[in-house]
Image (spheres, grey):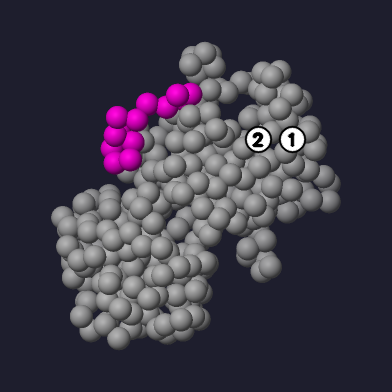
Amino acid sequence: MTSKRSCFLFASAAALTAVLALSASQPVDAQQRKSIRWAVASIDTYSYKVAASVTKMIEEALGGEYTVTVNPYPSTTAAMKATMDGDGEIGYTADVGMEELYAGEGGFRNYKPSKSLLVHTWYAYPMESFMAVAAKNADKYKCWKDFSGKPVFYTPAGFMNWLNFRRAYKTLGYDFKHLQIDPKSQSDALQAGTIAGAVAYTTSGTSLVPYWKETEVRMDVTVVNPCPDEVAKLKAGGLAIETVDPKNAFSKNVGVSQIQGVPICLPTTRGRTCRKTSSTGFSQRSRPTRASLPRWMRALRRWRRISSACRSTASRPIPPLRCTRAWQSS
């Protein structure tokens, strides 16, 4: 494991421990259950792999009193709904997913949670969504407008990068024509021309999602960046453009010196209802040891930078986690 990835995972675990310390302060019947359920997307996604890799660390930080279970769902939207309907204490989403939730749009149109709405707690990491095609067809596509109205696999429907590209297309005024396929068949679909292109994404500008790594092994791909006028329109619409070094994500040449993608920020969320935790109980659950303090401080500084950047790019304010009397009774 690289030092950069280790730092990221430690940052995630450090921040999540603080969140789970609040989650652990529940009524007696919840304490008897000794379980904290973490709802994430399917097992072949980064959300599942990150959650699964830090559960032991979190359980140790909580004194071994709780078992943290990672429960995968078909999509991030489904994981959000599971948490809000009482099937999880911790949810996984992105800024764009929270915007749709609070606006009552897309997959959340007419949706009423049986328990409570999600609220932001902490930002874990950014992702960058971009477009790619089979290298043999690269000369057909110069801008994102060339994909308007054509069948594209925009990642699995309901995933946050799927929502992100739908938001980008809405800003650009393009026709979002999604063709749902099995992610494992993406390479076959690209080579056969069943889909014109496919949306890829990196985590923190480095790690490709597993099914995209498989695609890259099986075929040559070319990244298609938005044209300058599209970049200007996206920025005017309140979206950001993030550059990614392709050498940090792909093992082969993808035809561009820099990848341009629309970023999203992946927070971990929890239900709106919570209870205050005493400072003594909190410190006992989340206090680092003397030996680990330097790592905690580095990890938390990185987390704060990510959180600040994500909040500054959010196009619609989302309520943060606050344990108020009103929310305790909601």
Q: Percent x, y for residue 255? A: 35, 83
User: Pointer 2: what residue?
Assistant: 36
Dot 2: few (<14), some (14–19), or many (≥20) neighbours within 10 Å?
many
Quadrant hosting residue 190: bottom left
Residue at image point 61% right, 50% down: 51
Task: Give yes or no for contact between labels 2 and 1 (Cβ–Cβ under 8 Å).
Answer: yes
Q: Secondary structure at mark 2?
A: strand
Residue 329 shows which numbered tag? Answer: none
Tell me: residue 110, above or below residue 164.
above
Amino acid carrying label 1: it is Tyr
Amino acid carrying label 2: it is Ile
Count of numbered labels shown in the rendering: 2
Q: Percent x, y for residue 47? A: 54, 53
Q: Is residue 155 left or right of residue 6?
A: left
Q: Is residue 113 magenta?
A: yes
Between the residue at mark 2 and the residue at mark 1, the CA separation in whole angstroms equals 7 Å
Q: Secondary structure at mark 1?
A: loop
Q: Is residue 146 magenta?
A: no
Q: Percent x, y for residue 325? A: 53, 14
Residue at image point 46% right, 49% down: 74
For the record, the magenta segment spans 103-116
Q: Quadrant of the N terminus?
A: bottom right
Tell me: residue 10, above or below residue 89.
below
User: Pointer 1: what residue?
Assistant: 66
